[in-house]
Image: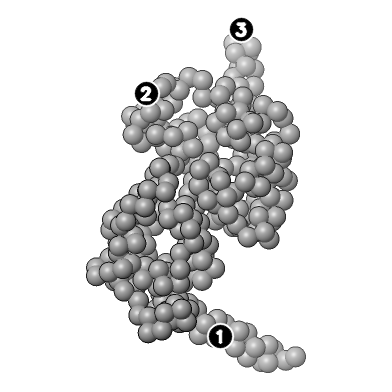
């Protein structure tokens, strides 16, 4: 029984690790700057290539804001996004919102409404409200700080 | 090419970069020249810049004014009204990086004027605005 527990624990830990590892990308200053000025630069792995193509086509109406780039920068950034995009439909959303993907919804299913509507969070686009180290690439559960200051349990 | 010649060439490139670096005054001067073509004798005004900045345009529901995200104090940090991301101060006195890259300045005028005012800003408005924030928001 003990060994079974150990195996389960290792399996769980490595799947959690695999998830956070998947979100690492090589440094790309252009993507970081252009996609990270109004919100954190969301990891390319969190949407499919088709989603990113749609997104980069509609930057003049980017979730209600004008986020246009010149054609060259747009193409360069899209190539980077496509290269690291998800291949799995669990990371796809017709709305192009990462928070509407099946993956995101499952991952956040235990987050309470009061946490989502907390003044420090306000919006599902605000990853770093709880994933306080996400901009350094650390999305691990142990680094989560809920808006009330508590660790994620 | 000898090492010494290469060194001189490098010094020249680095040196010319420093000479050509843009500053808030050089950007104001550029926009002023452009504005003076349409309005002879145009001179930038911090007061007009402040009016532009504080005015509730009401074009965008989420961002009715520049101050929706940047606050009314150019020396202070702002906060994106939708995403809550921190925005570095607009005033060069609080944020020396501001108004040092013409491409970046044009990009943000293009986006934010469209967004908040519903049209592109004129060269005169840009000159007024940079004048206003360069004075730390005092008129």
Image quadrant of residue A74? bottom right
- Quadrant of the image containing the N terminus of chain A: top right
Mark 3, chain letter? Answer: A
Lower sequence index among marks 2 and 3: 3
Which residue: 44% across, 42% down?
B83
The answer for how far apart the CA atoms under marks 2 and 1 are is: 56 Å
**The furthest residue to the left:** B139
Mark 2 vs mark 1: same chain?
no
The answer for how far apart the CA atoms under marks 1 and 3 are is: 72 Å
Q: Position of residue A92 (x, y in %)?
A: 66, 31
Q: Position of residue B2 (x, y in %)?
A: 72, 91
Q: Secondary structure at mark 2?
A: helix
Is residue B42 shown above or below A79?
below
Residue A1 numbered mark, or none: 3
Question: Mark 1 highlights which residue?
Answer: B16
Select label 1 or label 3 by which is in front: 1
Q: Determine whether, in the image, residue A2 is placed left or right of residue B32.
A: right
Q: Secondary structure at mark 3?
A: loop
Q: Position of residue B57 (x, y in %)?
A: 36, 52
Q: Secondary structure at mark 1?
A: helix
| A2 or A137: nearer the viewer | A137
Mark 1, chain letter? Answer: B
Question: Mark 2 highlights which residue?
Answer: A114
| B65 or A67: nearer the viewer | B65
Q: Determine whether, in the image, residue A57 is placed left or right of residue A150.
A: right
Q: Label 1: how many residues lie within 10 Å, few (<14), some (14-19) or many (20+)?
A: few
Q: Determine whether, in the image, residue B40 is placed left or right of residue A9.
A: left
The answer for how far apart the CA atoms under marks 2 and 3 are is: 39 Å
**The furthest residue to the top:** A1
Image quadrant of residue A93? top right
Callouts 2 and 3 close, C-beta under 8 Å = no
Q: Position of residue B136 (x, y in %)?
A: 29, 67
């Amino acid at each position: 029984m003990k060994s079974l527990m150990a195996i389960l624990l290792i399996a769980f830990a490595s799947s959690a690790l695999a998830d956070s590892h998947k979100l690492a990308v090589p440094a790309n200053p252009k993507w970081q700057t252009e996609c990270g000025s109004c919100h954190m630069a969301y990891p390319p792995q969190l949407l499919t290539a088709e989603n990113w193509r749609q997104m980069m086509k509609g930057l003049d109406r980017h979730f209600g804001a004008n986020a246009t780039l010149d054609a060259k920068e747009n193409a360069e950034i899209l190539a980077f996004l496509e290269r690291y995009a998800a291949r799995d439909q669990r990371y796809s959303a017709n709305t192009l919102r990462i928070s509407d993907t099946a993956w995101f919804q499952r991952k956040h299913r235990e987050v309470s409404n009061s946490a989502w509507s907390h003044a420090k969070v306000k919006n599902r686009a605000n990853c770093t409200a709880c994933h306080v180290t996400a901009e350094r690439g650390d999305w691990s559960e142990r680094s989560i700080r809920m808006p009330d200051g508590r660790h994620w349990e | 090419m000898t090492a010494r010649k290469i060194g001189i060439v490098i010094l020249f490139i680095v040196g010319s970069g420093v000479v050509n670096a843009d500053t808030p005054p050089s950007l104001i001067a550029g926009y002023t020249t452009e504005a003076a073509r349409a309005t002879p004798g145009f001179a930038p005004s911090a007061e007009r810049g402040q009016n532009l900045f504080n005015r509730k345009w009401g074009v965008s529901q989420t961002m009715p004014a520049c101050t929706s995200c940047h606050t009314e104090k150019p020396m202070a940090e702002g906060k994106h009204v939708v995403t809550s991301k921190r925005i570095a101060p607009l005033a060069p006195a609080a944020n020396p990086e501001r108004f040092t890259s013409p491409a970046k300045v044009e990009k943000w005028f293009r986006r934010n004027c469209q967004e908040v005012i519903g049209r592109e800003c004129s060269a005169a408005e840009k000159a007024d605005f940079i004048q206003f924030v360069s004075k730390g928001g005092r008129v």
